[in-house]
Amino acid sequence: MDPVGAQEFDELIVKLRDLLGLTIVMITHDIDSIFTIVDRIAVLGDKKVIATGTLKEILQSPHPFIEAFFKGQRAQLRKGVKDGR
């Protein structure tokens, strides 16, 4: 999805969640969507769920996959990653 379309999609998901009180299950690898939408997250790695919790809790995990995904060079470009928001 292009950046404009992705942002609009994320905004729609959040709006529907908040207006209708929905629980939304979403599968994505898009770091911006993760930081924009999620309240809770389950991270899959090593062919299983390796961590669950709030984004702040996940960012505290020392698991190598989580470190690489959320703290790697590309993820560092995402505002808020460094301060563990």
Image (spheres, rainbow, N blue to C red):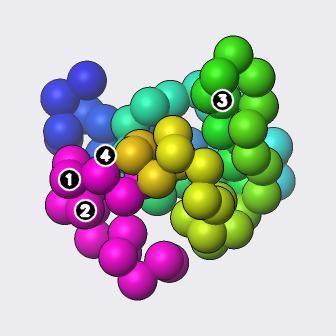
C-alpha span from label 4 to label 1: 21 Å
In the rendering, at what x and y percent does residue 66 appear? 53, 47
Q: Is residue 81 highlighted in magenta? A: yes
Q: Which badge, 4 or 1, is on the more N-terminal residue?
A: 4
C-alpha span from label 2 to label 4: 19 Å
> Mark 2 near mark 1, Cβ–Cβ under 8 Å?
yes
**Residue type of the residue flagged with mark 4:** Gln
Q: Residue furthest bottom?
A: 83
| Residue at (38, 37) in percent of width and height | 30
Circle on res. 73: 1
Q: Quadrant of the N terminus?
A: top left
Circle on res. 76: 2
Q: Nearer the viewer, mark 4 or mark 1?
A: 1
C-alpha span from label 2 to label 3: 20 Å
Question: Can residue 43 be seen at all in this image of the molecule?
Answer: yes
Q: Is residue 6 highlighted in magenta? A: no
Q: Which residue is mark 3?
A: 44
**Residue type of the residue flagged with mark 3:** Leu
Q: Residues within 10 Å of mark 1 (few under 14, many from 20)?
A: few
C-alpha span from label 2 to label 1: 5 Å
| Residue at (17, 29) in percent of width and height | 2
Give the left or right position of residue 23, taking residue 41 as reference.
Answer: right
| Residue at (52, 45) in percent of width and height | 64
Q: Nearer the viewer, mark 3 or mark 4?
A: 3
**Residue type of the residue flagged with mark 2:** Gln
- Label 3: which secondary element: strand
Range covered by the magenta-colored residues: 70-85
Circle on res. 7: 4
| Residue at (65, 23) in percent of width and height | 46
